[in-house]
Image: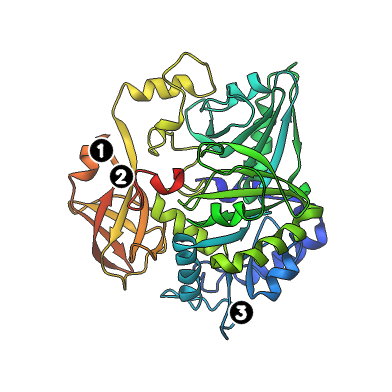
């Protein structure tokens, strides 16, 4: 795993020598200190802030930092101390994150995801270029979304992102905050020479307010005139809406496993939209929520995270993402031949999930996986699922002779947690809403 030393992990702040020196001093000072789970760097902050930063800070936001962006990790309320207290057990934000998690599952939550990296792919050849670079089918009419990976020639996952088709010659690409430099580089490197296609970064031009939860349609419908019914605005589509006089590009997509909408708003309108949402949201039980709740929610739903669960060394077939690859037709794409070859032989590993029944067991990631007493891998990501009431982990089950679903599910598993082995139950389908009824409802 070379991502921690990939030069494309850097962002605009790293171009400033004084900022780099400030951050380097902190990193050097921590070289021999305890490496706490979820620990945030303190130096060189705040650097990049969303238009909502001051409002969220006043509401109790405790911020983390990603590629220089200040992002709410959780919200302190009711006298809670708005500061991280790190621990190898349950940290001080555990109950607060659970409160935000349940608000999203049971009512509606608002997440500031303005730090998303955002790009436009424009030009008369934009469709052909993206169809070559993307493993999933982007040849869809305007108004549609595509969740897709971008693969290397070995079939490994280089990017994991969402593509919205805006027009015949225009696509909107949304990817993770920390992968802005990496993903832009990968896309630009793979635009065929002479193609009329240009990648333009528009990250700072748009704020993103993600409205998620079973009451999100009710709340949003209270503010717009457009028809939000499932028939008029189904999952995997985008629509242009208007809130408080602001133009909004609403993407019906989710990373938390609930009905919801990513509201992409020109930055100058972000505060007006936020104020209208929070004002109207009181009647619907709206709660502000942060990235640590997103992590807990996505773990329950089985959504993968690039850089931990998936990456250049793992193919969609190994990661359980074969459904998001256009192998049924004859459409060529980068990595196709490698996947076709993989399909013809046993896979060397398969991503599986694990549940630990004991609620006191804390999973942090990197715990060793044992199958029938033998080491077969380690957890790529882990956390606590507040709806399930259990710790959840994901990791690749490895076997030189080959791994399939039957092999994974037929084993008896333990995880080594702080030097002790604890029983774990494997799963391949998400433990929360495996039929996607809540997402598509």
Badge 3 is on which residue?
Answer: 82
Residue at image position (50%, 63%) is 293
Q: Position of residue 168 (x, y in %)?
A: 69, 22
Q: Disc 2 to disc 3, how far (Cα)? A: 37 Å
Q: Is residue 156 left or right of residue 24?
A: left
Q: Give the quarter of the image for residue 275.
A: bottom right
What is the secondary structure assignment of the residue under circle 3?
loop
- Image position of 190 with respect to 179: above or below: above
Badge 2 is on which residue?
Answer: 428
Q: Please tell me which residue lies in front, 346 or 207.
A: 207
Q: Is residue 67 left or right of residue 47?
A: left
Nearer the viewer's eye, disc 1 or disc 3?
3
Pointers 1 and 2 in contact (C-beta within 8 Å): yes
Q: Please tell me which residue lies in front, 125 or 280.
A: 280
Q: Disc 1 to disc 2, how far (Cα)? A: 8 Å
Badge 1 is on which residue?
Answer: 405
Marked residue nearer the N-terminal end (1 or 3): 3
Residue at image position (48%, 49%) is 308
Q: Position of residue 2 (x, y in %)?
A: 54, 45
Q: Please tell me which residue lies in front, 360 or 188.
A: 360
What is the secondary structure assignment of the residue under circle 1?
helix
Q: Position of residue 368 (x, y in %)?
A: 32, 57
Q: How is the image coloured?
A: rainbow
- Image position of 236 with respect to 261: above or below: above
- Image position of 10 with respect to 163: above or below: below
């Amino acid at each position: 795993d070379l991502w921690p030393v990939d030069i494309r992990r850097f962002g605009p702040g790293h171009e400033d020598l004084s900022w780099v020196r400030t951050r380097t001093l902190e990193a050097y000072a921590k070289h021999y200190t305890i490496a706490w789970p979820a620990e945030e760097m303190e130096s060189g902050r705040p650097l990049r802030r969303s238009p909502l930063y001051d409002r969220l800070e006043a509401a109790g936001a405790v911020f983390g930092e990603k590629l220089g962006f200040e992002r709410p990790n959780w919200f302190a309320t009711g006298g809670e101390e708005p500061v991280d207290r790190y621990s190898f057990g349950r940290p001080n934000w555990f109950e607060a994150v659970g409160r935000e998690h349940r608000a999203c599952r049971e009512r509606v939550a608002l997440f500031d995801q303005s730090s998303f990296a955002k790009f436009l792919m424009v030009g008369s050849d934009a469709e052909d270029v993206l169809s070559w670079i993307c493993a999933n089918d982007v040849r869809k009419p305007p108004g549609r979304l595509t969740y897709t990976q971008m693969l290397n020639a070995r079939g490994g996952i280089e990017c994991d992102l969402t593509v919205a088709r805006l027009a015949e010659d225009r696509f909107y690409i949304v990817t993770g905050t920390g992968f802005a430099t990496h993903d832009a580089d990968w896309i630009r490197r793979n635009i065929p020479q002479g193609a009329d296609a240009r990648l333009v970064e528009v990250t700072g031009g748009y704020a993103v307010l993600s409205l998620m939860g079973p009451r999100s349609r009710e709340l949003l419908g209270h503010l717009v005139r457009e028809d939000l019914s499932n028939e008029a605005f189904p999952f995997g589509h985008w629509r242009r809406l208007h809130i408080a006089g602001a133009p909004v590009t609403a993407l019906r997509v989710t990373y938390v496993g609930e009905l919801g909408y990513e509201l992409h708003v020109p930055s100058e309108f972000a505060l007006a939209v936020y104020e209208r949402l929070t004002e109207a949201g009181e009647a619907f039980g709206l709660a502000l929520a942060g990235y640590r709740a997103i992590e807990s929610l996505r773990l329950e739903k089985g959504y993968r995270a690039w850089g931990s669960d998936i990456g250049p060394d793992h193919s969609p077939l190994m990661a359980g993402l074969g459904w998001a690859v256009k192998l049924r037709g004859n459409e060529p794409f980068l990595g196709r031949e490698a996947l076709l070859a993989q399909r013809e032989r046993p896979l060397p590993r398969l991503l599986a999930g694990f549940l630990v029944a004991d609620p006191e067991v804390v999973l942090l990631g990197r715990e060793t996986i044992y199958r029938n007493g033998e080491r077969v891998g380690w957890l790529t990501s882990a956390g606590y699922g507040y709806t399930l009431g259990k710790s959840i982990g994901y990791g690749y089950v490895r076997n030189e002779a080959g791994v399939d679903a039957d092999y994974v599910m037929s084993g008896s598993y333990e995880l080594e947690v702080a030097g002790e082995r604890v029983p774990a139950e494997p799963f391949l389908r998400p433990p929360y809403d495996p039929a996607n009824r809540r997402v598509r409802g």
